[in-house]
Image: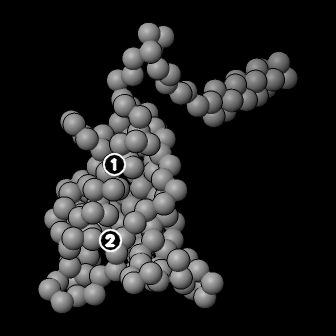
Amino acid sequence: MSARDRNRARLAFILAIAVGGCRIESRAPADGTDTIPDIATQVKRMLERSAEAWNRGDLEGFMADYLRAPTTTYVGSSGLVVGWEAIHARYAPLFEAGATRDSLRFEGISARLLGQEHALATARFVLHRGGQVTGRGPFTLVLRRTEDEWKIVHDQSASDPPDEEASSE
């Protein structure tokens, strides 16, 4: 291979990396219409419904936002949980009669599209009882657009380390 051919190959390689690393973002049409309503608003509404279901002890309502599929995943302190049924089983003991389940709310909800079919959301969960915060932490959701709504396909949640100053509201 000649020096000229090597230089061309290097240039082609560099261009391939540069083009491959570029991100294409979709923009709203010039007429101001948008085929996907504001994702942050939709995710906020979804999480509000989820917290309401949690707080009234409605496991099915809480799980309704997860895609009912064997590929839906959850990662938390207990590790990886694969499949809607397994995630449901993970939460079920918290919803049994007589179980202690703290109230839930979400803060700092942010979401962005990852194309037309997927979105990424981040926020913080706060568990509280009697004016005391009992748990909190960040989470990330990967959502998939179904025919008429967004569904969680991956949920990764983490708990903040214990902090005595953050234990009361």
- The residue depicted at 44 percent of the width and 81 percent of the height is 131
The answer to whether any part of residue 52 appears in the image is: yes
Quarter of the image where one finds residue 66? bottom left
Q: Which residue is mark 2?
A: 81
Q: Amino acid at mark 1?
A: Arg
First along the sequence among labels 2 and 1: 1
Residue 2 in sight from this viewpoint: no
Identified at 29% across, 82% down, the residue is 101
Q: Residues within 10 Å of mark 1 (few under 14, many from 20)?
A: few
Q: Is residue 103 above or below residue 119?
A: below
Q: Residue 23, percent across and down?
A: 58, 31
Give the camera-side residue of 124 and 93.
124
Q: Amino acid at mark 2?
A: Val
Given residues 27 and 73, the one toward you in this image is 27
| Label number found at residue 45 | 1
Q: Position of residue 118 (x, y in %)?
A: 39, 41
